[in-house]
Image (cartoon, coloured by chain):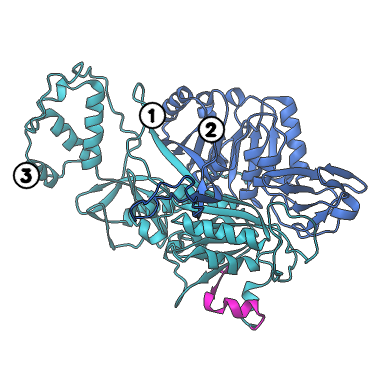
Chain colours: A blue, B cyan
Amino acid sequence: MSFVEYSEFIQEGDVAIIFLGHDSMMPVKVQQGAQTQTRYGVIRHSKDLIGQRFGTKVTCSKGGWVYVLHPTPELWTLNLPHRTQILYTTDIANITMMLELKPGSVVCESGTGSGSLSHAILRTIAPTGHLHTVEFHQQRAEKAAEEFREHRVGHLVTVRNQDVCKEGFGVTGVADAVFLDIPSPWEAVKHAKNAMKRQGGRVCSFSPCIEQVQKTVEALANEGFQEISTLEVLLRVHDVRSITLPLPDFGSDQPLETPTDTPVPSNASVLCKTTTPPRDMAGHTGYLTFATKPSV
Amino acid sequence: MADNGDNDSQHRVNEGDYVVLKRGDIYKAVQIQKKKKTVFEKQWFFLDNAVGELYGTTFEVVTGGILQPRKPKCVESSADAKEAGMDNRNILDDGKSQKLTRDDIETLKEQGLKGQEIVQQLIENSTTFRDKTEFAQEKYIKKKKKKYENSVMVLRPSCRVLAMMYHGREPGKICHLRYDTLAQMLTLGNIHAGSKVLVFETCAGLVLGAVMERMGGYGSVVQMYPGGGPVRAGMESFGFPSRFHDTLHEFPICHVNALLAGALDTEAKDIDAGVRLLVIASRFHPCPVLLGLIKFLAPSRPFVVYSQYKEPLIECYTKLREQGGAVSLRLTDSWIRHYQVLPNRTHPVLLMSGGGGYLLSGTTVAADTPKMGPTRGEEPPPKRLKLTETTEG
């Protein structure tokens, strides 16, 4: 298993995603002799996981069952341990396309945070690309590096523990794309420009607050970036439902003879297959600002 | 992976390249052919001078239809203190403020005046310009520039650029698939180098091209197609190197049932075994397409189905639930909004996309053997799904 390549059978050392039911999942590190508790019973790694196919149903000790899924960056985003607020798949998908990421891309990213976007980038740029990710918090940087190794993507990424606003990304003139998710991205714009290839590239800054966006757009314009564009995306989920709607009883069109005490109730109803929105939805994550470094 | 700095030939336009022309928000995909007239935004010109220049260069179109690389950053000298008003209470909109007539402007164009110079003439001949507020003046200049400038940027094709082009120019050709929805499909579908992807699309080949771009020439793509032959125009616009085409195979859908029944030999080699990932985006009813093609997927693989309309996907969802073999089913659509960001003038842009289509996504799981435990919101599948043998991962 790796996050950038599918394999068929579960092996020791793999990360697997246990699917418990609707919207309920958990990550598991597969180890000989280990056990994982679930509400459906115990999963014994040696017996139930190792050697099994990804995607199969696993029966737990109490008789209940779960599915074991091959990890993907999308599943990881939903299950990873949060050290910071993370980016979710909706934003990640747009960032990936708007930065024109593809196999072979060289990308610079700061801050690494909990590695949600990092995993998605690694999946997209493999096998020939590279990610230079900068995180100014030492423990988070170390934890991220550890996870990349466990997920067998360490060869595609370099983690640097430094402040991108002061010291940049640690590389210059190599990046096809730069991504910023930091409190003061305008302070890193010059470093972003230097990290990018001389012939041009794409940059993206993610900020929750519009004031940050304004400062960043100004900095980008001052540094000569073009095609500056700010947008936001939201995902709307539609819950499929079968609903029963009762039909009104307008009675007979014949004149009433005697008022009856107990009118015979009509139970006519109609079944509709439709969708309903969830009660709440994510209304804002952050503004995405994109720009192109011109070839000069 | 470091860039040597000297060898930037891969960043330069070559004859025969597929490129995308851009002006403002308008894009057009063309192929560079010397001495061939290209039309773009009501202008005719030759692309000859683009050859040898870096991608991303902006050109001015000068008389004769010749492209001239634009000097970088002609500084807009707002050094001269512009005379401006405070508000519009005294400005009358009687249509008579501009003294130049349409004929006058045509004459200026014929004299070979550059876009910037024409804008300058318009400003000087406007009686109300100096009464406008500074913001209104900037807006006026921006509007006139957009109308009279004749610059063209030559871009390298990419999913981003082509998806925006198709959505802006010919949305009907791509089932009104908006670019952010396409972005979701590629990510939710886990399209990556080395995948074996099954694509069924009637989006002029745009979706196929987007999938191939994310695969980088590694792995394989099987394009299922209805009718006479596969449509690939959109894919060709990506300008992939020829080795990418080696990974592309096609398969007519009229043979799908035969293939599933094991009645085909020769063509089956292309499909191979254990297709990993499934992407569907077509004008066909998605339900039978999905239920038919999902049989090719190994377990624990994501699939994504696009439909311009919601109801057919509701049907898909319901049928998949009944049949089993898939988890994490989600019916979603994406909402996108652009912003104008200017000092003291930051707000969402006035016009917004009304809709970008719908997606049904999920992950396959192993088909069940008849005996198993209590259901969990999923009815037991009534029949076995045929799983093809999987080779190495």
Looking at the rendering, the stretch of residues picked out in magenta corresponds to: B246-263
The residue depicted at 68 percent of the width and 33 percent of the height is: A114
A219 left or right, relative to A153: left
Identify the image quadrant of the C terminus of chain A.
Answer: top left
Q: Which residue in the protein does label 1 denote?
A: B341
Question: In the depicted view, which residue is nearer to us: A279 or A253?
Answer: A253
Chain ID, mark 3: B
- Asked whether the viewer can see residue B389, the reply is yes
Q: Quadrant of residue B30?
A: bottom left
In the rendered image, the vertical position of residue B245 relative to residue B94, given as above or below? below
Q: Which residue in the protein does label 2 denote?
A: A285
Q: Would you call the spot at circle 3 few (<14 residues within 10 Å), some (14-19), or many (20 or more)?
A: few
Chain ID, mark 2: A
For label 2, the SS is loop
Q: Which residue in the protein does label 3 denote?
A: B103
Q: Is residue B259 magenta?
A: yes
The spot of residue B346 in percent (x, y) is 37, 26
B267 left or right, relative to B111: right
Distance in Å between CA atoms under marks 1 and 3: 36 Å
In the rendered image, the vertical position of residue A242 relative to residue B203, given as above or below? above
The spot of residue A59 in percent (x, y) is 83, 54
B180 left or right, relative to B29: right
For label 1, the SS is loop
Residue A117 has which mark? none
For label 3, the SS is helix
- Residues indicated by labels 3 and 2 sit on the same polypeptide chain: no
Residue lying at the far right in this picture: please name it: A33
Tell me which label, 1 or 3, sits earlier in the chain: 3
Instruction: Identify which amino acid the numbered label 2 is placed on.
Output: Thr
The spot of residue B97 in percent (x, y) is 8, 30
Chain ID, mark 1: B
